Amino acid sequence: MTQEANLETYVKLISVELAISTESVRNTLMLLDEGATVPFISRYRKERTGGLDEVKIGEIKDLYAKYSEVEARRQTILKTISEQGKLTQELEKQITTTWEMTKLEDLYLPYKPKRKTRAAKARENGLEGLANALILGRLRDVNAEAEKYTNDNVPTAEDALQGARDIIAEIVSEDNNTRDIVRIAFKNTAQLKTKVVKGKETEGDKFSDYFDLAESMTRMPAHRLLAIRRAENEGIIKVQVAPRDKDSAVSRIERNYTRMQNSRSSADQMKLAIEDAYDRLLEPSIETEFSAQTKYDADTEAIRVFRENLRQLLLAAPLGEQRVLALDPGFRTGCKVVCLDRQGALLHHTVVYPHLPKSDVEGTLETLRYLIKKYDIEAVAIGNGTASRETEEVARRIDPTGKLRIFVVSEDGASIYSASKVARDEFPNEDVTVRGAVSIGRRLMDPLAELVKIDPKSIGVGQYQHDVDQTRLKSALDEVVVSCVNSVGVDVNTASKELLTYVSGLGPQLAQNIVDYRAENGAFTSRTQLKKVPRLGAKAYEQCAGFLRIRGAENPLDNSAVHPEVYSIVQQMAKDTRCTVKELMESAEKRKAINIHKYVTETVGLPTLTDIMSELEKPGRDPREKLEEFRFADGVNTIEDLQEGMRLPGIVTNITAFGAFVDIGVHQDGLVHISALSNTFVKDINSVLKLHQHVMVTVVGVDRKRNRISLSMKE
């Protein structure tokens, strides 16, 4: 199959699977092949894709990769069977017309090079003829026929029959229809059973719910399966998965092979062979396949949850460019204090000791008031770790009027950042405590810009992130970061290398080149100047330019999402309305006078023109929400302060498939189970909750021994 033929085949397959026109699929694949990124295609090539969003473009990309993998495997299989001289026209047709990897492997199974099996040994001993005779089922006396096959390696008739059954078992186990019967049995009736490994009860206490479990796989949620597989991997439990009704599957297989038998003795031998095939070959093989598939599906669900949480976290409301004092709380070692300017640059750092053992509250307040006045601080950020609530109580005494804005910020991953090469490069002369406090302050100002410096797995918003396929997880999370960065846009003159890395068309090297160019030549004054950055060629410029912002540029479009390739259209609009581009952007009346249909060309259609008009109205707008202040309940600082029935304010910190975790200010998040989210049924938690959402919860249970808190959001 030629490359062109392959492409058209992929286009048709993807079009049917996603219910998207073949033209949209074909154009999307061509754009991807040309090196265009998903954000770029979604934002700037709507005419070619029919307005597909990032999700659909991503699905097309994934399916293309999947079908390409199938095709590559197909060619390997055809080559291997052909070299064996066993590639018939019928078999070749079957192989070339399937696009399911499982079906492809089934067709290949009888020809797949394998270690020496019992069936192979039986064939070497000349027993294939006896096996074929038993399959045909016309032997009235199987023992007499078996005697004919005895030799030095097969001393008795029973040995001959056993060898024949081994051959039959292998034939049965490699039959496509037979394997499908067992697959269906697993899919519809598989049951997972667990048993604790003797002597592991104490070590595996956290997995005690799975010490003796029997549950249908059709009803098992992804998070439970991942927990069970983790317990199995740690050697705490043993797991077995099998259909509840094995006999029904075996009977179906037997009917396929014995319905034409006219010899009872042959049929009896066939039944023995089929039972052996099922127990020794089929069930273990399909169990492995089924377990891998269910693990893949569980990974998919966990990754989906992680992706959604990460997106919400990265797109959390920013405080914006304000002068911030950040506090990294601590008891014995004190609270690290840093002062940051509006761009997040470190101005000053020190340590205060508001808590025991030193407990210098008045000295702390004096220092903080002095720093706030000296650096004209506009907001305070407090890390949510150890001593957070106690530090917040002290901080609220700084300004008795209550005008000073105080925010509690998640510390998840801050320690990872503070010890990283990125942090060392940013602050080579400061220790990890200073770096960690700076990260807390910057997270308040712009969560996206700061969190891109940390491995997403360390941010603390996933479930079982260390148990899922790490390659798939990394790829999925990187896609989310890219999507978020490009949806917000990046100030090319203030962005870090890490943030620039995720901009469409760039990457680590070009991001570093931009930072180096900026350091050597000063701030960029126009998008065109980007072309002077070493190795940033025409293609990279095309992909990145629309997502990079230049504040104060001579051309106001350089601080918008309007792509340079359509600047001429905006300039013509301004000319037609007898004004400048700047005046056009500032005047709603002038924009209303524009008939966008007049500017349609062969390459620029109404979707792009509509986007241009929207961008002219609010150039460079930030899609993120506004930041709201939040305050925990006074007097509730530890789990010991909790009582059932308390109604408390909280912040959603993590969303899983089974519920949401909420910080209520006691150093231990509580769980709102999905069944306790609402008085009505909730299928998708993300439909009713978002990360960092401010909620009211009721305490319904406190397990102080296991440090667990149960909450409810029901009215």
Image (spheres, rainbow, N blue to C red):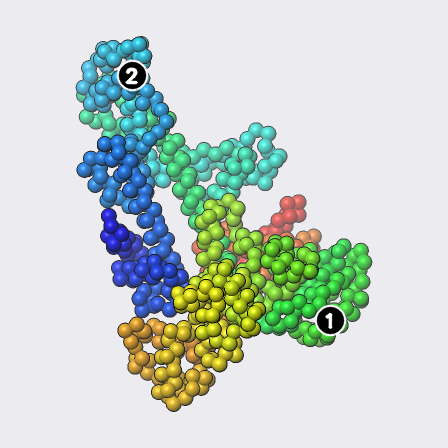
Residue drawn at x 62%, y 72% as measured from the top left = 342
**Labels 1 and 2: the sequence-earlier one:** 2
* Res 688 seen here: no
Marker disc for residue 679: none
Horizontal relation, residue 43 to residue 512: left or right: left
Horizontal relation, residue 332 to residue 322: left or right: right
Residue drawn at x 19%, y 15% as measured from the top left = 140
Q: Quadrant of residue 95?
A: top left
Residue ID for mark 2: 125
Residue drawn at x 32%, y 42% as measured from the top left = 73
Horizontal relation, residue 328 to residue 518: left or right: right
- Dot 1: element: helix
Other residues around mark 1 within 10 Å, as few (<14) / some (14–19) / many (≥20): some
- Dot 2: element: loop
Q: Amino acid at mark 2?
A: Asn
Q: Are circles 1 and 2 on residues that touch, CB within 8 Å? A: no
Residue ID for mark 1: 371
Q: Is residue 273 above or below residue 63?
A: above
Q: Is residue 68 above or below residue 635?
A: above
Closer to us: mark 1 or mark 2? Answer: 2
